Amino acid sequence: MSSSAVILLAHGARDPEWTRPFEVVRDRLRAEGIRTELAYLEIMTPSLEEAAELVASEGVKTVTIVPLFLGQGRHLKHDLPEMISDLKRNRAGVEFRATPALGDDPEILAAITAWAKRAAL
């Protein structure tokens, strides 16, 4: 068992097909041996709280939350830090940290740019 895990955090939607790309990312990480869960901010389950409880119950000591959002909006600036504070308070001994929004990464922006360029040609 690994002492670390990743929780991919997506917004959530009413259409179940919306989750497919996130499930692909989760499954690819799992295939590489990385303990990974997929959680949703709203509408869908599991919630971040539920996913955190699952990995913590397995003895995971370090959890990296990867928000699958392109920009740093209200959810990432306000909601997520509050949620992480609650997770830390309720699970002593487990370290929770979050990465920045995907759109803060130059490689992600380059990939989106390249994709849009191919689509336009």
Image: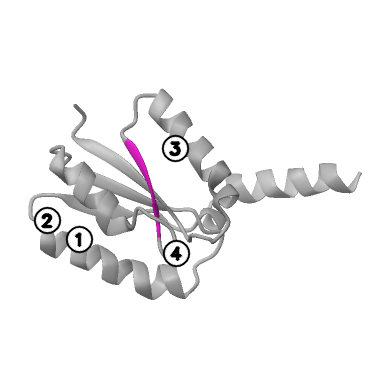
Q: Which residues are magenta?
A: 36-40
Examine the structure image and report whether residue 39 is included in the region drawn in magenta.
Answer: yes
The outermost residue toward the front is 15
Q: Quadrant of the C terminus?
A: top right
Return the residue at label 2.
91
Return the residue at label 1.
87
Q: Main secondary structure of the magenta part?
A: strand
Task: Give the SS element for disc 2.
Answer: loop
Q: Which mark is residue 43?
A: 4
**Amino acid of disc 2:** Arg
Q: Residue at x 19, y 26 (%)?
A: 1
Q: Are marks 2 and 1 in contact (CB under 8 Å)?
A: yes
The outermost residue toward the right is 121
Task: Give the SS element for disc 1.
Answer: helix
**Vertical side of 94 occupied by 88: above or below:** below
Q: Are marks 1 and 3 in contact (CB under 8 Å)?
A: no
Q: Which mark is residue 26?
A: 3
Q: Is residue 58 left or right of residue 113?
A: left
